[in-house]
Amino acid sequence: MSIMKARIKFRKFGVMRFIGHLDVMRYFQKAFRRAGIAVSYSQGFSPHQIMSFASPLGIGLSSDGEYLDIVLEDGEEVAGILDRINAQMNEEIRVRDFTLLEEGSKTSMAVLAACDYMIGVKPGKESFLLEEARRRQAVERFCHREDVMILKKTKRSEKMVDIWEYIYQVTDCFEDFQEFTGTDYGASSLEGVLPVLYMQLTAGSVVNIKPELVLEALFAQEEEDFRWTDYQVHRLEMYGDIGMKKGEVHTRTSEIPCQLVPLGQYGERGTIHE
């Protein structure tokens, strides 16, 4: 019996951003069963649907570009599959694209190389980032730095590390960011929050740079107090690097440049759009 690998792109926003990863996984499992999607199950004493997520969001973060890989049983009819899935979904978790993958394609987490983020100031919060002139000057100074040192904490130790190489882009201009990434983000689900910054950062199992680290470094540069709860992080897109080998990371100064493509196009055999 042959199987089909598929990649699902979905939004997560509103109050659903407070739902943890394990609950999101169970949510999709139930939605697939209700929709009659023939997802393959693992073997053994405790069979479960075969699925994997690419770098799940932390609690409180929203996104327009989350990815979930599944394996379908032979004979599953994919025509109308988006409507079948979304008919079972909450309004604040919606499937956007359904992509059939080439045989032998790696999981989205295995090929993840970078993520795009939008940072917004929550309503009623004060921030120097709301002052356009000062924000632009701060971002310009940040982009001309030679290093970005942050305190990396583990269970056993703390040490200062330089993450400058892994910050591909930081800007306060959406048009410039969209031109840099070459990605059409479409309508964002981030409502009631004023966007002030856009970032493209290295992501994946080898090096994963969180946007709050970059934001904290920017505040330290400006000698401003940083309160993480005043800001909303919204993930716009996730990418694979088609030139990257296992265990390798292409930094902003690598001899081999990044060749980023959205995860929905990585290993694509055919895509159904919302």
Image: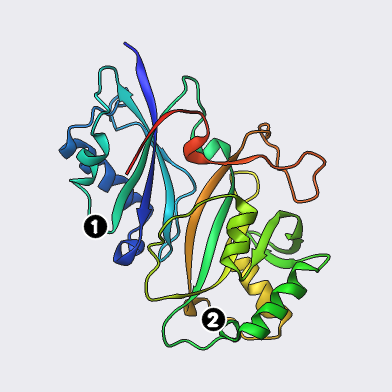
**Nearer the observer, 59 or 66:** 66
Q: Are marks 2 and 1 in contact (CB under 8 Å)?
A: no
Mark 1 is surrounded, within 10 Å at the Cα level, by few (under 14), some (14 to 19) or many (20 or more) other residues, namely few
Residue 192 in the image, given as x and y percentages of width and height = 38, 76
Residue shown at 67%/59% (left/top)?
A: 169
Q: Quadrant of residue 78?
A: top left
Q: Which mark is residue 236?
A: none
Look at label 2 and name its amino acid: Arg
Look at label 1 and name its amino acid: Glu
Which residue does the numbered mark 1 point to in the structure image? 91
Quadrant for the N terminus in the image: top left
Mark 2 is surrounded, within 10 Å at the Cα level, by few (under 14), some (14 to 19) or many (20 or more) other residues, namely few
Quadrant for the C terminus in the image: top left
Q: Nearer the viewer, mark 2 or mark 1?
A: 1
Taking 20 as reference, is 255 left or right? right
Q: Quadrant of residue 161?
A: bottom right
**Nearer the observer, 251 or 64:** 64
User: Is the residue 69 above or below the residue 148 in the image?
Assistant: above
Residue shown at 70%/74% (left/top)?
A: 139
Look at the image and tell me whether residue 155 can be seen.
Answer: no
Taking 228 as reference, is 93 left or right? left
Q: Earlier in the sequence, mark 2 or mark 1?
A: 1
Residue 119 in the image, given as x and y percentages of width and height = 52, 69
Which residue does the numbered mark 2 point to in the structure image? 227
Taking 15 as reference, is 183 left or right? right
Q: Secondary structure at mark 1?
A: loop
Look at the image and tell me whether residue 162 can be seen.
Answer: yes
**Nearer the observer, 257 or 175:** 175
Q: Secondary structure at mark 2?
A: loop
Residue shown at 32%/60% (left/top)?
A: 19
Residue shown at 72%/43% (left/top)?
A: 250
Residue 153 in the image, given as x and y percentages of width and height = 64, 63
